[in-house]
Image: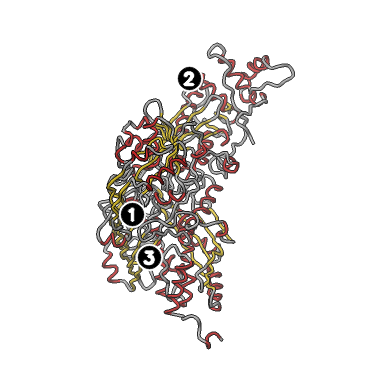
């Protein structure tokens, strides 16, 4: 492996690039070299040292190896993750690995045991007097803001009076050890330091919606006369479904380390997707300026949206105690507490009533989405909006009305999760596709293809969404589906499965192909911006910092590749630093699949500005033609043919430094074109759409409800990939996580509103054994993004998640065989074996009683 300190020992190469200068300075370098040894610097370094004689003290900076070879690992290549070696050797530092002073304090939280009630008394003086306890804080100890709602108010840092969910924080204890802090919390409950008046809890979001108990107002999107479409339709398809939530289950739980500074501020090390928001909230809680708070994030052990807003409370609590005590504070949540205090993916209750013609083409209708938001708004306004935006998935809804409700319940405030509401919205239309197919006796894939967005028009335009955005890559959407249909041998397998099911009374197989059309951009317009800071050092090495955060998805790797491509350097030459609010300010969260899109463009902007400055300098200093000047393979190249001149990157950088040219540059990017008017429910909220499709095949034991996924084929559109290796990993991981959400990951609360699936013993995520034996994943080639994204790539973080819907649709297909494919059963999610068995029993009771009669069994 090439190291960062390797130096050129081949001055002849440099001499060929700049013969006159090299020949004049090489002897000077050799003069200081011990007899019998080779010079330890390249010719350009020697020349730079000569130029610096008498200018600055000591030896000059050394140029790095700048041999004119093809650069390695730049954007577009399958480069390894920038922290891969650290990950597998254990050298990658996460929050609980960070060294802390010997007097570091440890925090434990006291959580509400009830889902709803009022706190009538809290005596923290008794807690402060307990062994090992240094401090204890509650609502009345906060000097600044007590509400830390990320967008809308409603999230108190501690309970003041009203208790809104089981797990809400009452107070925090700081002690000399983690054990002492936890023991103090337990002793506090035993000594009765708090009195709570428990009240009935509201846990049913549908009932809450009927009572108009919302965290935010209802929103409606409408296109055309949906009532007329229903009245004139040949068929009306109706149904409802429950779509369950999902626990983030990041490997690294919520954690932070906060150090007080000498200027009354704090430095916050946190596992966090939105450092700038945490900076803001910590400053407001402490009552100090934003610039007094520095938030740093080197990496997270997973985020998936669970650390976008819900990493901030712990930093605020730790910062409060750090400033009160003047000591460093560490807070990390045990898994069970982490699961109880943080929100999940929103469960949804969906209803649909669609009018279709004789061919099963949707003419219009009504869809209603009820999101279970928990006790406060958090990000629910935008999440339910995105569910509404994606209630069409890849299909034209015709003249339709989509209504989104944001129900309030006494549970933890649900929050961002990969897909951000989009998956829950897609589920409603995918259920309808199966229902239409069974009503008309057609294969579900046939119905899906007939309803895809298309350029052919009928009464209305079929390439415009119900919220008014034109779907620009309609042909690509069709190509993805048709290509996968052919490559996966869908119709051959359909015949084989139908024949198998006809002779198999117990085991039934199912097959489904489902597409994905996912919009890329934050639906909050102001978040679609990013900044970057580029620094080139005098040895030619490069440092890039940007506003995105790394949670294992490879964002930092891609940004390094972008810089390497723009500066024509090896990716090893570029290093990335931790995301810090004092380097790139006012950043957006790393979410909405936009990390590479936004920060990659910002990094490229910085590179372009720096290149322009260096080219201008080189043109004047070296008397070169500015026209056509370029960077290639670690060199500045000017001119053409016999007059072509090559200047190594190291020499260019050093010479520019001596010429007092700035080697630092900031970059900025804001996504163009996007807009959305909430008053009309119309606009263009997305810069572009990412497409994909998956075919899943399953086998179901209809007597137990157990099933297995036998084969999966995926074709996914990432435009011109920034890093195919990382993108394939994202597709694979997203699919498995989506499959887990729809099959085995079941959240359970007891009647009192306490989460009882609060650990790996009671909440099951997919494991290695759940991987399909045949798992074929391919990135679509030769179809660059139609929009001017970074190198015409497309986002890959969230869209693959929804490919997992194909597994759920395949389960419905297998069950439908019990009704001779005349009915698609209602199958709520997660489709656990229990739910699958109940669906099978319901179908058999109507179509094929079990066990068969004696005559049938013979």
Task: Identify the residue shown where x is 63% and y is 29%.
Answer: 6
Question: In the depicted view, which residue is nearer to us: 602 or 622?
Answer: 602
Question: In the depicted view, which residue is nearer to us: 161 or 417?
Answer: 161
Q: Where in the figure is residue 268, as x and y percent of width and height?
A: 42, 35
Which tag, 1 or 2, sits closer to the chain's start?
1
Query: Mark 2 near mark 3, Cβ–Cβ under 8 Å?
Result: no
Q: Residues within 10 Å of mark 2 (few under 14, many from 20)?
A: few
| Residue highlighted by disc 3 | 241
Q: In terms of image quadrants, where is residue 176?
A: top left
Q: Secondary structure at mark 2?
A: loop
Quadrant position of the N terminus in the picture: top right
Question: In the depicted view, which residue is nearer to us: 143 or 103?
Answer: 103
> Gap in Å between the C-alphas at discs 1 and 3?
26 Å
On residue 152, the disc is none
Q: Residues within 10 Å of mark 3 (few under 14, many from 20)?
A: some
> Gap in Å between the C-alphas at discs 2 and 3?
66 Å
| Residue highlighted by disc 1 | 115
Q: Nearer the viewer, mark 2 or mark 3?
A: 3
Residue 193 visible in the displayed image: yes
Above or below, 35 relative to 637: above
Above or below, 507 relative to 320: below
| Residue highlighted by disc 2 | 660
Q: Nearer the viewer, mark 1 or mark 3?
A: 1
Q: Where in the figure is residue 653, as x and y percent of width and height?
A: 53, 25
Q: Secondary structure at mark 3?
A: strand
């Amino acid at each position: 492996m090439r190291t960062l300190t390797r130096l050129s020992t081949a001055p002849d190469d440099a001499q060929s690039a700049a013969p006159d200068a090299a020949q004049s300075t090489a002897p000077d370098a050799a003069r200081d070299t011990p007899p019998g040894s080779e010079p330890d610097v390249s010719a350009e370094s020697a020349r730079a040292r000569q130029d610096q004689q008498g200018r600055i003290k000591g030896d000059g900076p050394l140029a790095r190896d700048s041999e004119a070879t093809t650069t390695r690992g730049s954007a577009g290549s399958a480069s390894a993750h920038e922290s891969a070696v650290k990950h597998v050797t254990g050298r990658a530092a996460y929050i609980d690995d960070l060294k802390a002073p010997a007097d570091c304090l440890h925090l434990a939280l006291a959580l509400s045991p009830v889902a709803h009630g009022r706190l009538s008394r809290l005596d923290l003086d008794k807690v402060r007097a307990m062994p090992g306890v240094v401090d204890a804080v509650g609502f009345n100890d906060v000097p600044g803001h007590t509400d830390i709602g990320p967008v809308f108010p409603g999230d108190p840092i501690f309970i003041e009076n009203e208790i809104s969910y089981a797990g809400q924080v009452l107070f925090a204890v700081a002690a000399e050890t983690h054990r002492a802090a936890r023991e103090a919390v337990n002793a506090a409950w035993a000594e009765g330091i708090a009195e709570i008046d428990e009240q009935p809890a509201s846990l049913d979001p549908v009932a809450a919606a009927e009572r108009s108990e919302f965290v935010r107002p209802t929103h409606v999107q409408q296109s055309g006369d949906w009532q007329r479409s229903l009245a004139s339709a040949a068929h009306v398809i109706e149904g409802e479904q429950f779509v369950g939530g999902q626990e983030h289950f990041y490997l690294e739980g919520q954690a932070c380390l906060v150090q007080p500074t000498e200027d009354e501020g704090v430095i916050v090390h946190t596992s966090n997707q939105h450092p700038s928001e945490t900076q803001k909230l910590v400053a407001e809680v402490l009552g100090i300026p934003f610039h007094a708070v520095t938030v740093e994030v080197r990496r997270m052990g997973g985020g998936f949206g669970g650390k976008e807003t819900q990493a901030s409370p712990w930093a605020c609590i730790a910062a409060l105690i750090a400033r009160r005590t003047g000591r460093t504070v560490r807070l990390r949540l045990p898994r069970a507490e982490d699961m109880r205090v943080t929100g999940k993916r929103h469960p949804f209750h969906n209803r649909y009533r669609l009018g279709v013609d004789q061919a099963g083409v949707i003419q219009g209708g009504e869809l209603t989405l009820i999101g279970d938001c928990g006790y406060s708004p958090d990000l629910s306004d935008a999440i339910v909006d995105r569910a509404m935006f994606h209630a069409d998935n890849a299909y034209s809804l015709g003249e339709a009305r989509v209504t989104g409700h944001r129900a309030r319940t006494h549970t933890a405030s649900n929050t961002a999760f990969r897909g951000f509401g989009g998956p829950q919205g897609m589920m409603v239309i995918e259920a309808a596709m199966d229902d239409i197919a069974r009503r008309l006796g057609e294969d579900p894939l046939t119905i899906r293809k007939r309803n895809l967005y298309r350029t052919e028009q009928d009464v209305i335009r079929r390439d415009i969404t119900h919220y008014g955005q034109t779907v620009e890559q309609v042909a690509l959407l069709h190509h993805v589906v048709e290509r996968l249909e052919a490559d996966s041998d869908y119709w051959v397998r359909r015949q084989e499965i139908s024949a198998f099911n006809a002779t198999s009374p117990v085991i039934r197989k199912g097959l489904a192909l489902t597409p994905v059309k996912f919009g890329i951009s934050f639906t909050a317009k102001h978040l679609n911006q990013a900044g970057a800071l580029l620094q080139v050092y005098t040895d030619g090495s490069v440092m890039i910092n940007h506003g995105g955060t790394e949670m294992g998805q490879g964002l930092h790797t891609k940004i390094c590749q972008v810089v390497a491509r723009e500066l024509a350097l090896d990716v090893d030459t570029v290093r990335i630093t931790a995301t810090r609010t004092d380097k790139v300010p006012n950043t957006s969260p790393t979410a909405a699949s936009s990390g590479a899109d936004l920060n990659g463009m910002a990094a490229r902007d910085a590179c372009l500005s720096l290149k322009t400055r260096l080219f201008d300098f080189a043109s004047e200093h070296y008397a070169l033609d500015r026209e056509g000047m370029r960077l290639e393979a670690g060199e500045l190249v000017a001119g053409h043919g016999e007059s072509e001149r090559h200047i190594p990157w190291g020499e260019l950088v050093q010479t520019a430094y001596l010429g007092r040219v700035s080697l630092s540059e900031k970059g900025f990017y804001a996504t163009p074109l996007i807009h959305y008017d909430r008053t009309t429910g119309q606009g263009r909220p997305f810069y572009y759409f990412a497409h994909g499709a998956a075919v899943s095949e399953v086998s179901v034991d209809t007597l137990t409800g157990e099933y297995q996924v036998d084969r999966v084929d995926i074709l996914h559109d990432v435009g011109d990939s920034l890093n195919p290796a990382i993108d394939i990993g994202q597709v694979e991981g997203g699919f498995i996580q989506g499959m887990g959400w729809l099959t085995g990951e079941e959240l359970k609360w007891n009647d009192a509103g306490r989460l009882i699936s609060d650990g790996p013993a009671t909440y099951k995520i997919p494991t290695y054994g759940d991987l399909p034996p045949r798992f074929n994943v391919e990135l679509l080639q030769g179809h660059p993004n139609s929009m001017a994204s970074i190198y015409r790539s497309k986002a890959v973080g969230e869209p693959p998640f929804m490919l997992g819907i194909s597994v759920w649709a395949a389960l419905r297909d297998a069950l439908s065989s019990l009704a001779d494919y005349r009915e698609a059963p209602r199958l709520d999610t997660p489709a656990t074996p229990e739910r699958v068995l109940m669906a099978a029993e319901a179908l058999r009771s109507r179509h094929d009683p079990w066990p068969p009669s004696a005559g049938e069994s013979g």
